[in-house]
Image (spheres, rainbow, N blue to C red):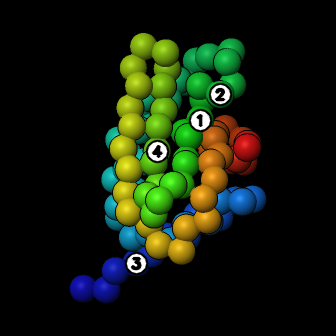
Amino acid sequence: MMETEAVVAQGTLTVTCPRDELARALGIVSRGVSTRTTVQILAGILLRVSDGKLELAATDMELSLRTSIDVQGATEGSVVETQSTGTAKS
C-alpha cells in the first residue's frame, strides 16, 4: 500500500505528513470549532509545529479539543486556519 503525504505550507509553517493521519487529526479537532461566533479566532484550528510534531487545537470556549501527529521536514511555527476564509493568520 502506497502512503500518500500531505504538505501543509502557509507562510512560515511547512510540514510533510501522511494524509490519512492529518485527516484523522483534523476530524478530531474540527468538532471543537465554533460555527457561530463573533470572535473570529474561535472559527479556526490552531496548527503549531514544535519538535517534529504538528499540534492541532480548536475550541468554542465550552469544548476544547487537541491532538498531535508526527511530521517530517517541519519548519517550526504556528498559524490559525479558518474554514470560511481559507487563509491562515499568524
On the image, numbered disc 3 is attached to which residue?
4
On the image, numbered disc 1 is attached to which residue?
44
Q: Mark 4: which amino acid?
A: Leu
Q: Mark 3: which amino acid?
A: Thr
Q: Are marks 2 and 1 in contact (CB under 8 Å)?
A: yes
> Disc 4 and disc 3: Cα gap in Å?
20 Å
Residue, far front: 51
> Disc 4 and disc 2: Cα gap in Å?
14 Å
First-in-chain label (4 vs 3):
3
Q: Position of residue 45 (x, y in %)?
A: 54, 39
Q: Position of residue 55 (x, y in %)?
A: 45, 48
Q: Residue at x 60, y 59 (%)?
A: 76
Q: Position of residue 72 (x, y in %)?
A: 47, 73
Q: Are marks 3 and 1 in contact (CB under 8 Å)?
A: no
Q: Mark 2: which amino acid?
A: Ile
Residue, far bottom: 2
On the image, numbered disc 2 is attached to which residue?
41
Residue 49 appearing in the image? yes
Q: Residue at x 67, y 18 (%)?
A: 39
First-in-chain label (1 vs 4):
1
In this image, 38 relative to 62: left or right? Answer: right
User: Residue 56 — which label?
Assistant: 4
First-in-chain label (3 vs 2):
3
Crowding at dot 3, Cα within 10 Å, few <14 / some 14-19 / many 20+, comes out as few
Say what secondary structure mark 2 lies in.
helix
Q: Position of residue 15 (x, y in %)?
A: 55, 67
Crowding at dot 1, Cα within 10 Å, few <14 / some 14-19 / many 20+, comes out as many
Say what secondary structure mark 1 lies in.
strand
Quadrant of the image occupied by residue 89: top right
Figure quadrant of the C terminus: top right
First-in-chain label (4 vs 2):
2
**Nearer to us: label 1 or label 4:** 4
